[in-house]
Image (cartoon, rainbow, N blue to C red):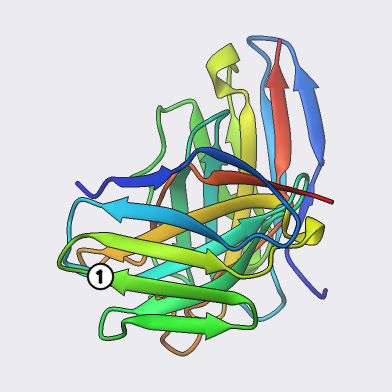
């Protein structure tokens, strides 16, 4: 059974810092890995999707990397802003399932 | 509509009562998913509908939980005889065709969720 762990659980940083969120998974036979953002009272918004054949994806100030062999992914946020404050969720698709396994998320606060 | 909508946004009920949660998927999306997010926990899959196929109910935690999807569109998640451990945010998502994201139509779009509190 796939298990997904996200570290840290919570993070508070001053505006402008570069930061790294970590996601690890136990079964390396994954198809896709997806990073989501969740704002309070709102649904999940997809940030980046990395397919199993890819090593990284970039969108603006966000960069996500994937190392299947070690069972890890990182989400790098450059020059953080208060608007980045949210919970970031990692979701892994594995075993041929169309249903992802989610981590518990990292709650990020970026203060001015 | 423009996105997935869910109602009510908040529901407070007493232990033992039945509740119904509603999800309106994006028009034309054939796949619909229900998830539960308990405090401090990751999203937990509950049930998946795809077109006219039999739903995947493998994530339902007990027989008190059921869901239906009428006319291939709106879905209702029903929880009977609610317990305090049912308190959570219930999220609905839809996708154009189901399947894996990264493949055409596999991307899931999430609603804002219903926060259920069982007293």
* Drawn side of residue B49 relative to residue A32, left or right: right
Q: Mark 1 = which residue?
A: A67
User: Dot 1 surroundings within 10 Å: few (below 14), some, or many (20 or more)?
Assistant: some
Q: Residue at x 54, y 50 (%)?
A: B34
Q: Could you say which is closer to the camera, residue B10 or residue A39?
A: A39
Q: Could you say which is closer to the camera, residue B20 or residue B108?
A: B108
Quarter of the rendering containing residue B24: bottom right
* Drawn side of residue A83 relative to residue B28, left or right: right
- Residue B54 in view in this figure: no
Which percent across, then down, holds residue B117? 71, 21
Q: Residue at x 59, y 71 (%)?
A: A47
Q: Chain of mark 1?
A: A
* Drawn side of residue B75 relative to residue A19, left or right: right
User: Quarter holding the N terminus of chain B?
Assistant: bottom right
Vertical comparison of B65 with A109: above or below: above
* Drawn side of residue A106 relative to residue B116, left or right: left
Q: Could you say which is closer to the camera, residue A16 or residue B15?
A: A16
Which percent across, then down, holds residue A30? 24, 68
Which percent across, then down, holds residue B4? 73, 64
Q: Residue at x 46, y 90 (%)?
A: B104
Quarter of the rendering containing residue B108: bottom right
Please state the total of marks drawn on the protein image. 1
- Residue A40 in view in this figure: yes
User: Quarter holding the C terminus of chain B?
Assistant: top right
Which percent across, then down, holds residue A26? 20, 51
Q: Residue at x 61, y 70 (%)?
A: A78
At mark 1, the secondary structure is strand
Vertical comparison of B97 with A99: above or below: below
Q: Could you say which is closer to the camera, residue B44 or residue A52?
A: A52
């Amino acid at each position: 059974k796939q298990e997904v762990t996200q570290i840290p659980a919570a993070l508070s940083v001053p505006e402008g810092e570069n930061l790294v969120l970590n996601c690890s998974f136990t079964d390396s036979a994954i198809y896709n890995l997806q990073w989501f953002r969740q704002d309070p009272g709102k649904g999940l918004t997809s940030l980046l999707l990395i397919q199993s054949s890819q090593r990284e994806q970039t969108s603006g100030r966000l960069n996500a990397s994937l190392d299947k062999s070690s069972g890890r992914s990182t989400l790098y946020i450059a020059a953080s802003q208060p608007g980045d404050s949210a919970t970031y969720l990692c979701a892994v698709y594995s075993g041929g399932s169309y249903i992802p396994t989610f981590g518990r998320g990292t709650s990020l606060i970026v203060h001015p | 509509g423009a996105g997935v909508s869910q109602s009510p946004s908040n529901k407070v009920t007493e232990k033992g009562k039945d509740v119904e949660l509603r999800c309106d998927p994006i028009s034309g999306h054939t796949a619909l998913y229900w998830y539960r997010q308990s405090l401090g926990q990751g999203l937990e899959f509950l049930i998946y509908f795809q077109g006219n196929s039999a739903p995947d109910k493998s994530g339902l935690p007990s027989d008190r939980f059921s869901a239906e999807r009428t006319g291939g569109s709106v879905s209702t998640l029903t929880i009977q005889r609610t317990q305090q451990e049912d308190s959570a945010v219930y999220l609905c998502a839809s996708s154009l065709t189901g399947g894996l994201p990264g493949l055409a139509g596999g991307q899931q779009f999430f609603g804002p969720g219903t926060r259920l509190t069982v007293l």
